[in-house]
Amino acid sequence: RRQRGRLTDPRDIPRGIVAQKRKVMVRARGKGVAAIVKSAESPGWGPQAPVQFQEGVAYTIDHLLDFGVVPYTTGRMYERGEGMTGVGDMLTVQRWIPESRELVYYSERPGVTVHEILNFNQDRVWKIAVLDFIIANKDRHEGNIMVETKTKRIWAIDHHKTFEESWTEWH
């Protein structure tokens, strides 16, 4: 039997194009884990699979390949009053990477460079590249890679522009 965690403490995350995106605590069995939650709505991208499907399948493929570059991700039903409003009744819930920043942050600051971070993570960079090829990800950029601030380990996030019908649209 699957346990359902309760979503609590929602806080808006202003960056990104997904209409509803919030940091929450997922509480189950007396424990809490931080997560990012997105509504199923993905405006402006035309016909494609629902966001919770894309994000969840990207994680599943990453897990099956034993890459470990995508944080744990699942889709779930939500109840009104859990701090989310919007279109639909499905959410994507992804483990929040604590003490992390987008890779783009390091291109804008002195100190450790983007090149140094990617060089340190060569094996993970290749895994992300292979995963993106498999899922036809058209949206990998420095804003969709998180870097743990202490370890400099990178994570691939934001897989809502994947599994499109035509790969010929790539620029």
Image: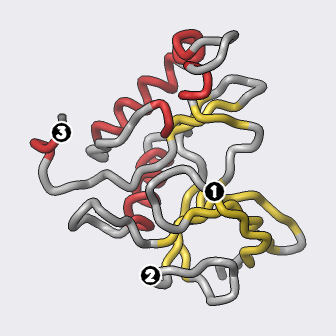
Instruction: Answer left or right for 4 relative to 129.
Output: right
Residue matched to label 2: 87
Residue type at the position of mark 1: Ile
**Which residue is drawn at the image coordinates 51% and 45% (left, top)?**
157
Q: Label 1's element?
A: loop
Indicate whether 43 appears above or below 116.
below
C-alpha distance separating marks 1 and 2? 18 Å
**Which residue is drawn at the image coordinates 75% and 58% (left, top)?**
34
Residue 83 x/y as whole percent: 68, 78
Indicate whether 40 appears above or below 160.
below
Residue type at the position of mark 2: Val
For residue 170, the mark is 3
Indicate whether 45 appears above or below 144.
below
Query: Is disc 2 surrounded by few (<14), some (14 to 19) or many (20+) residues within 10 Å?
Result: few
For residue 157, the mark is none
Residue matched to label 1: 13
Residue nearest the observer in this picture, 60 or 164: 164
Which mark is first along the chain, 3 or 2?
2
Looking at the image, the residue that sits furthest to the right is 30
